[in-house]
Structure formats: C-alpha cells, structure tokens
Image (cartoon, helix red, strand yellow):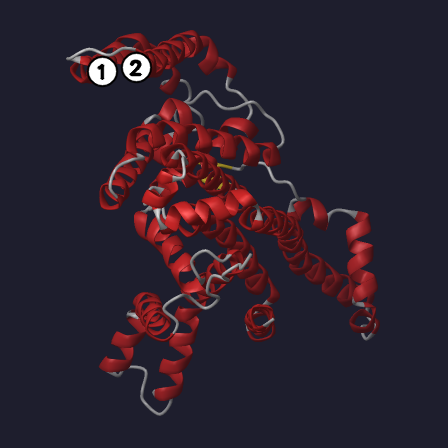
C-alpha cells in the first residue's frame, strides 16, 4: 500500500513540475519535455528489464538506439531508384554473402568439434573483410556518387513510420542475439566492456556506411504519424477549433483586420502545441502498454525465475535452469524495447543524425535513469526517465534564473557574473551529479525501490 502511495506522490510531483514549466515558460516547452520524458521512460524500461530483472550489464544502449533510428530511415524514406539501379544488385549479393558467413560460423561453432576450431572461426571473420570489400566496394561507390548532396544512399521502403518502431525492435533483437551469442557467459565487467565496444562498432558503421544511412550528412524530413504544422494552419477544421476555444479573446477585437491577424497568430502558435500533444498521446499509449506488459511479466513465474537467476545463478543452475539461454532471451527483449525507443526518438526529432549518438547521452544517462528511479521496479524506471530528463533540460534555465536573482544588483559587465552565465551549459552536469549523489546517499535503492513479492 505504501509503495502505491509513493508512486502516486512521485508522479503527481512530476506532473506538477511539467505544468509549472508550461505556466512559466511555455506549453510548447512543457510538451517537448513531456515527450522526451516518455521516450526516455521507454529506454530506461528496456535497460531495467536487462539489469533489474536478471542483472545483465548492457553498456551498448547507444548501439541499439542507433539501430532503431536507422530502422526509421530504412522503413519510411522513399527508395532512391537511381541508386538501386547503380549498385543495388551488388549490395544484395554482399548481404547474402554476409548472412551465409554468419550462418557458417554459427554452424561450425555449434556442430563441429576439432582442435583448431577457434582459429578457423577467427580466420573466417578476418577473411570476410576483404571479401566484402571486393563484392560490395564498386556498388557502394556507385550508390554514393548518385546525387551525393541530397541522397547518395539507397533510401527505404516508403512505409508508414510507426511501422519502423516495430522493425527497429526486431533489428535490435537480432543484433542482441548475435551479441549475446558472443558476450553472454562472460563475467559482468567483461560483459559491460564488450557490449560497449560492440555498440561503438555499430555506431561507426552507421556513421561511415553512407550508402545505407547517409552517414554524417544526416537524413532529414522523415515522415510523421501526426499532422504537420503547416497543414494544420491551412486546415479549415483546425482554424475553426482555435477560433472556438479563443472566442473570448477574439471578440474583444472590433477591427476585422486585427481580429484576423490575432486568429492567424493563435493558429500558428497552437499548431505546434497540437502536434506535440498528438505525439504525447501516442507515446503515452506506448508507455502504458509496456508498463502493463512488464508488470505482468515481472509477476509471472517467468519473472520470479529471472529474479532467482539474478539473485543466485549457482542455485538456479542447480535447479536445472539454463542460465545462459534465459539471459539471452531477456537480453533480446530489453534490446528490442531500446530499439523501439530509438525509432520513436528519431520519429519525434524528424531527422536521423548518426554523429549525435554519444555514450554520455545515449548510454550512461539512461543508466542513471534506472539507478535513480529504482532498479527492478518498472514504475521506478519510468520515474527515473522523467526525473533525469527533466533535470537535464531544466537545469540550465534554473541556473540562469538563480544567477540573475543572486546577481540582480550587480552590473552585467561583472566578470564573475559573465563567467557563470557562460558556464550555464555545464550546470546540467553539476545538477545531474549532485542529484545522483543525493539519491545514492539517502535512497540507495532508488526513488521507488523494487517491491519484494511474497508468495
């Protein structure tokens, strides 16, 4: 009962804080924070499933988010027919070769037993690099030379972008399967290092394989599951809706020209709020669905088994549980959720920028969300996503407010005041570190600790 009360109080406070941002800053900023908090909540839930349920350390979050973002491009962008004509066959051939090689490596590793098997597998992996270069090299050069400034890549399948969220989850799960076969079974510290390194390889590939993702040139103008602001501003139903809700303000204008100008301004400002509110509705549905799914899984016999494996692997093995196999399953599930959130983030941003994937933002900050919220608690993972992202965004405006308040009687040319104002972007690191220290000191199990289920 107390645990439920803590949940209600915590989320009520977060709701109040977001409302205060809307009142004192703008509702557009408040909704932007809300949307990014909801996406961050999905990310932290994916990590929480891996770490909180089974004790797996995944420092490769950044790579799975990039895979989800890439899925948004591959699914929603229209295909570049000239690029396909120039090198599509070579890319398909190299893809068949790569899949065949991966299957061969797994077959040799699982079915064959001889003394120099590991050397053979290593040799096949090394030999694959020049062979891929020979097969795909000419095709890649031909594709990237096709209108390199605006395209220079194969494009996608021109499908609805929401479909890419599920494709991103599937691709992330497949990569997790390969990564898990390589890394799972290692000691926890080696597992953390190996997942971080493999995610770096994924990011490097996404950055440099321009034929696939345009690399550092970025992909902009992605599709949306919600209307565009410009379309709303020219829609009769939306104009009438804004006119209805603001009839009191508009009635005060006697001059028709002034009234039309005010209505136009209200329509323009409201269109952005409507779009963000539409995103909030979709993201909220995703978070609620994942929460229900995660809670049912946690309270099921499968969830009890995973926590038993987390708490004592040796005892679980003694009871006949295949620990490595179970770890692989939950590693794939958590990675799929992370990939799903990566596609959500790119959809909301409207662009795919491989260079923006940095470990601080897309790995360690998400881990902070899980630790602050409460490891092993789904509500805690969501709360952590809200709290950490809210602090990350609002620490700079709050720091500026404090500096102006403290130095209100000081001239703007004061060296100390100027230095503090110039250093405002770094206050978020200070606030994040201070917040984490306070939580670890006074709430070491997180703001919403894991609830022990007694059978």
Q: Could you tell me residue 359's position as x and y percent? A: 31, 48
Is residue 27 depicted above or below 232 in this figure? below
Is residue 66 depicted above or below 11 in this figure? above
Instruction: Name the residue located 31 percent from the left edge and 10 percent from the top edge.
Output: 138
User: Would residue 65 be found to the left or right of residue 434 on screen?
Assistant: right
Under tag 2, what secondary structure?
Answer: helix
User: Foreground: 178 or 132?
Assistant: 178
Mark 2 or mark 1: whose residue is earlier in sequence: 2
The residue under label 2 is: 105
As measured in the structure, the alpha-carbon distance from the residue carrying label 2 to the one carrying label 1 is 6 Å
User: Foreground: 252 or 12?
Assistant: 12
The residue under label 1 is: 121
Quarter of the rendering occupied by the N terminus? bottom right
Question: Which residue in the rendered view is the most extreme toward the front?
Answer: 319
The crowding category of the residue bearing disc 1, from other C-alpha atoms within 10 Å (few below 14, some 14 to 19, many at least 20), is: some
Q: Could you tell me residue 165's position as x and y percent? A: 55, 36
Instruction: Name the residue located 56 percent from the left edge and 60 percent from the top edge.
Output: 34
Quadrant of residue 130 within the rendered picture: top left
User: Foreground: 423 or 54?
Assistant: 54
Instruction: Name the residue located 83 percent from the left edge and 63 percent from the top edge.
Output: 244
Under tag 1, what secondary structure?
Answer: helix
């Amino acid at each position: 009962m107390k645990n439920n009360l803590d949940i209600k109080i915590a989320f009520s406070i977060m709701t109040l804080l977001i409302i205060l941002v809307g009142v004192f800053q703008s509702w557009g900023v408040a909704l932007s924070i809300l949307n990014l908090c909801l996406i961050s909540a999905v990310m932290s839930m994916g990590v929480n499933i891996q770490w909180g349920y089974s004790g797996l350390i995944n420092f490769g979050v950044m790579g799975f988010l990039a895979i989800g973002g890439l899925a948004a491009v591959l699914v929603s962008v229209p295909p570049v027919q000239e690029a396909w004509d120039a090198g599509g066959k070579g890319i398909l051939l190299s893809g068949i070769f790569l899949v065949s090689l991966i299957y061969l490596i797994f077959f040799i590793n699982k079915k064959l037993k001889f003394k120099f098997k590991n050397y053979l597998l290593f040799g096949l992996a090394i030999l694959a690099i020049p062979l891929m270069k020979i097969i795909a090299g000419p095709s890649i050069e031909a594709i990237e030379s096709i209108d390199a400034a605006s395209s220079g890549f194969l494009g996608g399948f021109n499908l609805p972008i929401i479909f890419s969220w599920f494709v991103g989850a599937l691709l992330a799960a497949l990569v997790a399967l390969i990564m898990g076969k390589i890394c799972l079974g290692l000691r926890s510290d080696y597992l953390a290092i190996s997942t971080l390194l493999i995610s770096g390889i994924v990011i490097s590939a996404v950055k440099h394989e321009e034929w696939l993702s345009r690399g550092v040139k970025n992909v902009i103008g992605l599709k949306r599951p919600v209307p565009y602001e410009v379309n709303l501003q020219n829609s009769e139903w939306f104009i009438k809706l804004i006119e209805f809700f603001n009839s009191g303000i508009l009635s005060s204008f006697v001059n028709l020209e002034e009234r039309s100008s005010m209505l136009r301004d209200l329509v323009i400002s409201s269109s952005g709020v409507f779009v963000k509110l539409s995103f909030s509705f979709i993201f909220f549905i995703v978070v609620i669905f994942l929460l229900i799914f995660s809670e049912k899984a946690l309270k099921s016999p499968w969830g009890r088994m995973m926590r038993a494996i987390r708490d004592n692997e040796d005892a679980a093995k003694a009871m006949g549980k295949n620990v490595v196999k179970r770890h692989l399953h939950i590693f794939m599930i958590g990675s799929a959720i992370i990939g799903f959130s990566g596609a959500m983030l790119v959809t909301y941003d409207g662009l795919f920028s491989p260079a923006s994937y940095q470990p601080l933002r897309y790995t360690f900050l998400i881990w902070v969300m899980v630790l602050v919220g409460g490891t092993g608690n789904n509500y805690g993972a969501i709360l952590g996503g809200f709290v950490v992202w809210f602090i990350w965004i609002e620490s700079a405006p709050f720091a500026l407010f404090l500096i102006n308040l403290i130095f209100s009687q000081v001239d703007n040319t004061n060296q100390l005041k100027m230095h503090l104002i110039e250093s405002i972007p770094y206050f978020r690191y200070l606030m994040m570190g201070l917040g984490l220290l306070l939580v670890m000191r006074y709430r070491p199990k997180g703001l919403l600790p894991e609830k022990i289920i007694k059978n």
